[in-house]
Image (cartoon, rainbow, N blue to C red):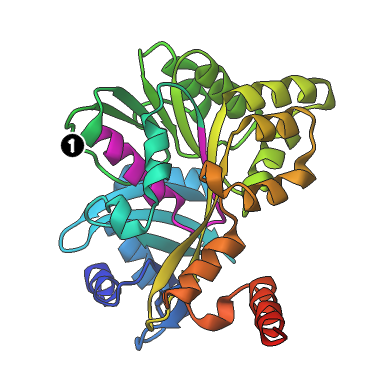
Amino acid sequence: MTLESLLGIAKARAASDLLIMVGDRPAIRVAGEWERLDDAPLSREAVLDICRDLMGPDLMDQLEQKREVDFCRSMDGTGRVRCNVHYQRAHLAMVLRLVWPEIPSADVLGLPAHVLDMVDLPHGLILVSGPTGSGKSTTLAAMVEHINQHRWAHIITLEDPIEFMYTNKRAIIEQREIGADTKSWHDGLRSVLRQAPDVIILGELRDLESIQIALLAAETGHLVIASVHSSTAHGAIMRMVDVFPASQVDQVQVQLSISLRMIFAQQLLPGSLPGTRVLAYETLMATPAIQNQIRNAEYEQIPNMIRAGRDFGMNSFEQCIEELAIHGRVPSELRPRSAINGHAALARGNGRH
């Protein structure tokens, strides 16, 4: 079976990923669950032929040197595909993520309007957090497209690799791919402030230097939107602070408390309809009270402040999932136990009067 036919099956099944490896059948991930296709296990020669057709000689050489490589391709009939080719047990394997053919709108994704309003700010730091596969890249793309449609701005993205391709509308967008347009992530970060951006999009804050530059850019009149691997909003703050040595922590907490505007933490849950997933999210807004907690490293108080911060546009995962369950968008068994117990207690109380 050819790569084109495998991708065709994946697209028809609305799969997010295609996994190919030597000695096993191809597999696709549909609504977060892996399924093997009804094909024979792939031989070493078959996987090698797929790699050669997909990558070309330059990337094949890079693969041999580094033993793994990331890149994107535009495939006829499928659209953009983000690829990771690597070795496991001395044999080739690859995971191909199918990128949405068009940048999804905020309405389609389920992003609330007040969250999108935040990307119209002139400066500051906005973080999108979540585990791998939670749709952070898609949310970032929707935010960029919102700016593109509504605001005059010069946007520079640093991506590894480029996934969504933007067409300039009101904004002027430069997309810089690590390896192709700049030699390294750090080189791109160090030069971005000299390229007159209004908005900087960073695919991921991954180390001390990237966080330092993001904070500096946010402090010096730029809007910085970046992703962080963390399952919760307050966890994203702790993850950023923890990469710094103890001697710099106090300074970083002050910088973060001043620069931060919002953290949008997200996850994808099984939907009520078979084969669907639904966005659930937690929103932290950098109110003066939240800023004070960050400055004083009182992170344990932040979840309670999120739950109590509805008037400021905040909500917790539990509150979001409860609303999704009430409206029938996710199965009722996903409702937080605390919410169920709360409704039961209320019902018992009403019964006594």
Which of the 4 quarters of the picture holds residue 246?
Answer: top right
Asked if residue 287 lies left or right of residue 179, the reply is: right
**Picture coordinates of residue 131 (x, y %)?**
57, 56
Residue 88 place in picture, x, y as percent: 56, 64
Magenta segment includes 143 = yes
> Going by the image, does 217 lie left or right of 51?
right
Instruction: Find disc 1 in the rendering and name its residue.
Output: 167
The quadrant where residue 49 appears: bottom left
Q: How many marks?
A: 1
On whether residue 330 falls in the magenta region, the answer is: no
Q: Amino acid at mark 1?
A: Thr
Seen from the viewer's position, the closer of residues 50 and 80 is: 80
The location of residue 338, given as percent across then percent down, is 69, 72
Q: Position of residue 191 (x, y in %)?
A: 45, 16
Q: Is residue 319 above or below residue 115?
A: below
Q: Is residue 22 visible?
A: no
- Residue 28 image-quadrant placement: bottom left
The C terminus is located in which quarter?
bottom right
Q: Which residues fall within the magenta stretch?
A: 126-148
| Residue at image point 49% right, 36% down | 226
When the figure is inspected, residue 8 is found, relative to residue 134, above or below; the finding is: below
Residue extending farthest to the right is 246
